[in-house]
Image: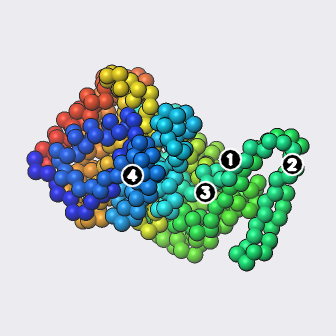
Amino acid sequence: MKRIMMKTPLVEMDGDEMTRILWQMIKDELLLPFVDLKTEYYDLGLPEREKTKDQVTFDSAYATQKYGVAVKCATITPNKQRVEEYNLSEMWKSPNGTIRAILDGTVFRAPILIDSIRPAVRNWKKPITIARHAYGDIYKATEYRVPTEGKAEIIFTDKDGKETFHETVYDFECAGVLQGSYNKDSSIRSFAHSCFQYALNTKQDLWFSTKDTISKQYDQTFKLIFQEIYENEYKAAFEAAGITYFYTLIDDAVARVIRSDGGFIWACKNYDGDVMSDMVSTAFGSLAMMTSVLVSPDGKYEYEAAHGTVTRHYYRYLKGEETSTNPIATIYAWSGALRKRGELDGLDELVNFADQLEGACIDTLNSGVMTKDLVGLVSAETKTSAVNSREFILAIRKNLEARLLAE
């Protein structure tokens, strides 16, 4: 088959551990035989981040701003144990957090559904997309372990040096812990625009939830900005599209979500979205069956798997053992990026290839061929065959070739 020629490069961000191994398998078996891949490559593996003092992460984000579309492998966010394991000079920050801050984007995560895996919430029939604000909150917070009794205060000094706010947080009578988090109106506005635009593009209702009854300044600011932007810029378009936007408290939203049949976007602040996306993905089946795309308000896209680097499987791989690691979310990161690149470049062949690649994944899963993590989730009447990662990718390739030849 003639390979599809790309017009514009997409940004390729390689990653760590087992997902790095799968990344190369996917390229070798599912992409390079069919597409003349044109990418600008950045190695976001932890050794390269250490070598460049994390400059490579910043460079990859700037490249995404230039080219408009990126695909990212899962990466390690080091903790104390990882610092020792990789002999790092410092505890480098999350690459995802750095990229999100530079692109000022919102993360949209949605489950991949197949017939044989039924959601744990029996009335869920359509995907629930989590829109996670990718800035601020505890991810950019300043923290302090309070060693003894003393006074903690918030002080704000304006640009002219005038102290305009000074309030006691707590008079500690013993040791404790202190945290100061923040956000910006500009980032919240970008978050709101991304959510409203994504809802219109996908023709889905948009829900937004915080806890403004308790957080009367922080959370309420989110609520008011969303409402202002909706009323002034999106209400007419939403009504014309036949979709709705509404705000509710996050505890009410959780109850509504559980009772719903799905098929909407649920917008959450950074920490809320982090937690709720894992809850939704697990209830639908598996975090390995969750798509993730970072969308900036000016139309830049970064696709990735929602899960981590699968460390446990990587250690087994290093011992020479075959692993049954699920590559679906990583494959969908590539298909999402290729589809968007094709759409932006007017390359229908590339868009079609992305559709066929995803279709081949679903064909393979529906035939009962799958990795071990999914076998225990399928309905009892489905006959399954648990295979290792390489066998699974080769089965997808067989179905992909059949689809492409059928055209």
Looking at the image, is 276 positioned above or below residue 220?
above
The residue furthest left is 1
Spatial CA span between label 4 and label 1: 30 Å
Residue position marked by numbered label 1 in the rendering: 251
Residue 122 visible in rendering: no
Q: What's the amino acid at mark 4?
A: Tyr
- Whether label 1 touches label 2, CB < 8 Å: no
Is 90 on the left or on the right of 368, as rendered? right
Q: Which of the two marks, 4 or 3, is nearer to us in this view?
A: 3
Q: Which of the two marks, 1 or 2, is nearer to us in this view?
A: 2
Residue position marked by numbered label 2 in the rendering: 150
Say what secondary structure mark 2 lies in. Answer: strand
Specify which label sits upstream in the sequence, 4 or 1. 1
Picture residue at 50% right of the left edge, 41% below the top = 88
Looking at the image, is 374 positioned above or below residue 8?
above
Specify which label sits upstream in the sequence, 4 or 3. 3
Spatial CA span between label 2 and label 3: 27 Å
Residue 161 found in image quarter: bottom right
Looking at the image, is 216 positioned above or below residue 146?
below
Q: Which of the two marks, 2 or 3, is nearer to us in this view?
A: 2
Residue 344 visible in rendering: yes
Residue position marked by numbered label 3 in the rendering: 136
Front-lying residue, 404 or 393: 393
Picture residue at 35% right of the left edge, 52% below the top = 42
Q: Give x and y (percent) for residue 251.
A: 68, 47
Front-lying residue, 77 or 378: 77
Residue position marked by numbered label 4 in the rendering: 303
The residue furthest bottom is 160
Spatial CA span between label 4 and label 3: 21 Å
Residue 402 found in image quarter: top left
Specify which label sits upstream in the sequence, 1 or 3. 3
Spatial CA span between label 2 and label 4: 46 Å
